Amino acid sequence: MIRAETSAKPLVTETATHYKVPFPYCVLRWKGYALSQEICEQKAKGNPAVDYSSRRRFLLSAGAAFVAPAFFDTPLDGQSHGPSDRRPDAILNRLVEGNRHFVAGTLTHSGRSPKDFTALALGQNPVAAVLGCADSRVPPEILFDQGVGDLFIIRVAGNYVSGAGASVKGSLEYAVAELGVTLLLVLGHSQCGAVKAAIQHLHDNDALPGAINDLVNTIKPAVLESKDKPGDGLENAIRANVRRSVERLRTLEPVIAPTVRSGKVRVEGAVYDLASGKVQLMS
Ligand SMILES: [Zn+2]
């Protein structure tokens, strides 16, 4: 059974040609899987040529068959209040503009009212994925002036990919393959405690308690890479750490790398300055 749902009232139908789903809250499910907004809208327009199973097939062909059907049990591809232009450049510009609001103290607080989050109960349609540090001073929604449902965010101390295990990589792959985000942003920040700890640990060569040791060891390559560069050692290591994650994601097979090569997805790095509130892109 194929089921289409709207924020107003769900529609249940047996064939895709019966859809009369008002935009923008369009969620199409096929055999229990949430499908893309684009496919949903095409089906709603009555386009019989659309292959609504293509994204799922992509997941399978991309080697992502480990994702259990139950994982998709919740409708995923609703429509947020985001822009219709989902090209990566447009999304990046949107975040840059949002950060200008933050720096100027003119936040619009968009997408944070009951009408916004209740509409999202049927599904999400974030415009970008952000890999940021867990640092309490670096909340992506706020510093980019975005609302509920706009950003798919993974936060881990040190904002790194390699060595972080499957959770970080899998989450970002999921954002691209299933949610259709077109921008992945790795967001480091000034005075990052995790990078500081890696520098200190390298200097002292001591043992840190618990899993902190593993965390710090994972960031060490970025510290070593930037060790002999001119300028501030901590700033260099923070940027090297972001750069390494960006490079890893751009070449991460089998899900993300092909989308980067085709130009559908852009992976960028940036550093947030705690004192000024500015996010500086690294490219
Ligand atoms: Zn940090």
Image (spheres, rainbow, N blue to C red):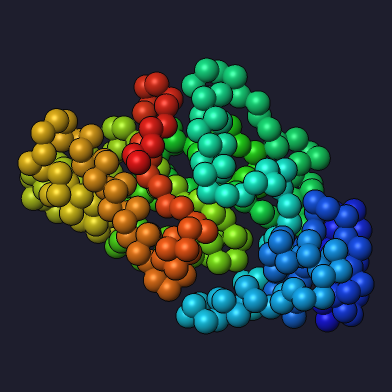
Residue drawn 49% across the image and 21% down it: 103
Q: Residue 180, position in %: x, y?
A: 59, 60
Residue drawn 56% across the image and 31% down it: 98
Instruction: Name the foreground residue: 114 vs 52.
Output: 52
Work out which quarter of the rendered image holds the C terminus and state it.
top left
Is 217 on the left or on the right of 20, as rendered? left
Residue drawn 15% across the image and 35% down it: 233
Q: Residue 187, position in %: x, y?
A: 40, 43
Q: Residue 50, position in %: x, y?
A: 74, 73
Q: Residue 188, position in %: x, y?
A: 35, 41
Instruction: Name the foreground residue: 256 vs 261.
Output: 261
Q: Please give the count of numbered marks on the rendered protein.
A: 0
Is residue 97 visible in the rendered image? The answer is yes
Instruction: Name the foreground residue: 30 vs 73.
Output: 30
Q: Is residue 67 above or below residue 141?
A: below
Residue drawn 43% across the image and 73% down it: 254
Instruction: Name the foreground residue: 109 vs 57.
Output: 57
